Amino acid sequence: MSDSILFATLFAVYIILKNNIADGPSGKDIFNLPFVFIETLLLLISSITYTMVSIATNTNNKKMINIWMIITFLFGCCFCIMEIHEFYHLIGKNYGPWRSGFLSSLFTLLGTHALHVLSGLIWIIIMMIHIYQFGVTIDNKIRLQCLSIFWHFLDIIWICVFTFVYLFGMI
């Protein structure tokens, strides 16, 4: 619930500051929709692969749980690498968060989401170790369900980012 409030606040700040470009670039000038679309696909596919983790959990298939967790982890890593590349590219053009209210709110929103994805990746590693060491116990099933909720929540937030930041930013 606290993450919902956090992201609602970040979206509100972004909406308020999106036109405060201070003679800097606007979203139209810096957004690369094909690149962001690939990021979006990576994250949405990772949601599908995590659903396969849930299915494997229901059948107590330790091997398949970890295989699908590895696949989910790889998609999440690719997403984070693309986010870092986007930040690096923007900063390289002197479009960093210090440039304007728009860029500051953009970096904060995207950075917070990326940090949450990174947290999810760490959680995936921890759960893979737990599954490997202790198997598909009741406690691990609950932990995997909690991770599922968190991971799918991040996808929902990213769909909002893609829509309200990138798509509407190109209008």
Image (spheres, rainbow, N blue to C red):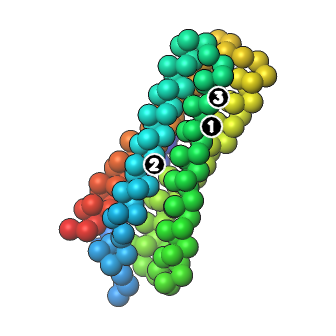
Sequence order check, earlier mark of 3 and 2:
2
- What numbered label is drawn on residue 95? none
**Callout 2 secondary element:** helix
- What numbered label is drawn on residue 70? 1
- What numbered label is drawn on residue 66? 3
> Is 12 above or below relative to 99?
above
Look at label 3 and name its amino acid: Asn
Q: Where does residue 19 sit, x and y in percent of width and height?
A: 29, 74
Q: How far apart are labels 3 and 2 at the CA level?
A: 19 Å
Q: Where does residue 164 sit, x and y in percent of width and height?
A: 29, 57
Q: Quadrant of residue 119?
A: top right
Asked if residue 130 lies left or right of residue 104, the reply is right
> Is 17 above or below relative to 94?
above
Seen from this angle, which residue lies furthest left?
A: 171
Asked if residue 112 lies left or right of residue 27, the reply is right
Q: Is residue 3 visible?
A: yes
Q: Which residue is mark 2?
A: 42
* Few, some or many residues within 10 Å of mark 3 (<14, 14–19, 20+): many
* Few, some or many residues within 10 Å of mark 2 (<14, 14–19, 20+): many
Q: How far apart are labels 2 and 1 at the CA level?
A: 14 Å
Look at label 2 and name its amino acid: Leu
Look at label 1 and name its amino acid: Ile
Q: Residue at x 45, y 37 (%)?
A: 47
Seen from this angle, which residue lies furthest bottom?
A: 23
* Few, some or many residues within 10 Å of mark 1 (<14, 14–19, 20+): some
Number of numbered tags placed on the structure image: 3
